[in-house]
Image (cartoon, rainbow, N blue to C red):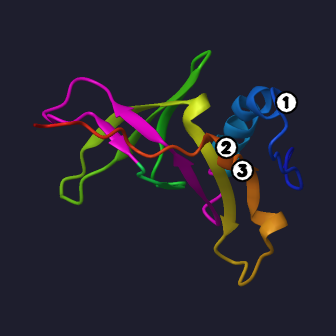
Amino acid sequence: MLFSNMTITRTPNRAESALPDLLRQMVEDLKNPDCYYWLRSNYFDILPPTDRTITQWWQAPLFLDYDALWKPAFEEDALLIDVILRNQLPAVYERIRIQYNQIWSLERFYKSQTTSTEAERVIYHDSDRLRMPPVHNED
């Protein structure tokens, strides 16, 4: 693995420029059924077509493994993937867009590994990026 021991923490611009490569490595790692990731972002957007009225999900961590991520595409400023967001059968894939500048944590785990240190599992973390959802005044 290219980034097996690499952790990016808060280093202005360096972390941001490394994130697309770390996400590409995540996509490669997920070809291994033993590997899974937790990706945390402030929000992601659900792209059309959708029947949802709310298409921006805040504080929704994504569990990603070999069977949970399809059709990854990398844009200049975002990752696009198909995921299953609804617990229903038959499974329905939805296209989501995650802007790189909204991602604040990326952790890698292995099912066969019973314990791991934070240094082993945290691939990327930038708590300065963590934001809470906007509050809408509904008076």
State the residue position of label 2.
128
Q: Amino acid at mark 1?
A: Arg
Q: Using the rendered view, name the quadrant where residue 93 is placed.
A: top left
Location of the C terminus by quadrant is: top left
State the residue position of label 3.
125
Q: Is residue 34 magenta?
A: yes
Residue contact between numbered discs 1 and 3, judged by CB atoms under 8 Å: no
Q: Spatial distance from mark 2 to mark 1, Cα to Cα? A: 14 Å
Q: Which range of residues does the magenta coloring cover?
A: 30-58
Residue contact between numbered discs 2 and 3, judged by CB atoms under 8 Å: no
Q: Amino acid at mark 2?
A: Asp
Can you tell which of label 2 and label 3 is closer to the viewer? 2
Q: Is residue 123 left or right of residue 55?
A: right
Q: Using the rendered view, name the quadrant where residue 25 is placed.
A: top right
Q: Spatial distance from mark 2 to mark 3, Cα to Cα? A: 9 Å
Q: Residue at x 85, y 37 (%)?
A: 11
Could you classify mark 1 by the number of other residues whose Cα lies within 10 Å: few (under 14), some (14-19), or many (20 or more)?
few
Could you classify mark 2 by the number of other residues whose Cα lies within 10 Å: few (under 14), some (14-19), or many (20 or more)?
few
Picture coordinates of residue 20, whole percent (x, y): 70, 30
Picture coordinates of residue 122, whole percent (x, y): 75, 59
| Above or below for 61 versus 73 | below
Picture coordinates of residue 134, whole percent (x, y): 35, 38
Could you classify mark 3 by the number of other residues whose Cα lies within 10 Å: few (under 14), some (14-19), or many (20 or more)?
some
State the residue position of label 1.
14
| Above or below for 30 versus 116 | above
Q: Is residue 87 left or right of residue 22?
A: left
